[in-house]
Image: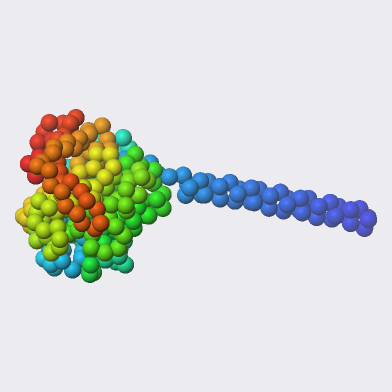
Amino acid sequence: MTDRARGTAARKEKQKHRLYQARTAALTVALGAVLSVQSQRAQSEPIPVDVQLVLAVDVSSSMSREELEIQRSGYVAAIKDPLFVTAIQLGATGRIAVAYVEWAGPDFQVLTMPWQIIDNSETAQRFADDLAAKPLTGGTDTSISKALLFSASLLSKSSYQAMRKVIDVSGDGPNTTGPYIVPTRDAVIAEGITINALPLLLNPAPSEISGEVELMRYFESCVIGGPGAFAFPVRNTDGLVAGIKRKLILEVASAGPHLVTVCKRRLRPTWFQFDGVKFHGRSSSIRLFGWPPAMASRVALR
């Protein structure tokens, strides 16, 4: 082969190599783009769940250390309870997303447990164990309104798509600082969020709203709202764990085919004013419809 022929062959070989490199680079870019789109789609497409549930727990200074410990243990026990897991699995998707917030004054909201999926006993146990391992927090003042706003923000920024969005707020006293409670409540439920309450009547915080009946009426009239909203009172430490269990089961069950209906009955008219709002006292009774009879009776007894 002449030198000219050898040179021509070498140039052709280099051209083939460059073409191969160009095609390889193009395929690499294309594949990277596809994977990137899939990754973004996975992140942008919300994960369907039956309920997004924010547990907003009062840790204000009116709560004693003993009450804080009992309250925390109550949520830990409720979350890993088999009945709670069963209620979750009866839903359309069989899973919920849960976040746990501890709150006190207007500048004290702590995301103790970020969003996690609970869909079986293992994920429930993991959430409960992680929560139990977290140190107790505490703050001064009582701003239910800021707790609601913080919780609503968590719901709006999450990566889940839920049939129901619920804030479960506990408290042993009325809103004493921060934004007015009723306009805040109304703004939150206007976003399609249901607010349920766990009034802690163990040792109600001193306020203009005094006594069990008045505090319960306050939560019913000024705090809860949205479809199927209800307040579930706890009157002693012995009943705290059981009360939290019942309430969580009711909240989860109301998103699936086994519905919870909250029936209101009017008491003797009682008008009083607090936080710039005049309101009327009511009490509620809770009835279970559509639940398997054995499960419904077990919920009622616990």
State the residue in front, 30 or 250. Answer: 250
Query: Does 144 appear above or below 136?
Result: above
Callout count: 0
- Residue 299 at least partly seen: no
Tell me if 151 is positioned left or right of 9 in this view.
left
Tell me if 26 is positioned left or right of 239 in this view.
right
Q: In which quarter of the image is the C terminus?
A: top left
Percent of width and height locating residue 50: 32, 40
Q: Which residue is drawn at 12% across and 31% down?
A: 293
Percent of width and height locating residue 103: 26, 62
Percent of width and height locating residue 53: 29, 48
Q: Which residue is drawn at 48% across and 47% down?
A: 44
Q: Residue at x 8, y 56 (%)?
A: 211
Q: Residue at x 27, y 35 (%)?
A: 256
- Residue 105 at least partly seen: yes
**Colour scheme:** rainbow
State the residue in front, 40 or 183. Answer: 183
> In which quarter of the view is residue 128 placed?
bottom left
Tell me if 39 is positioned left or right of 298 in this view.
right
Percent of width and height locating residue 112: 28, 62
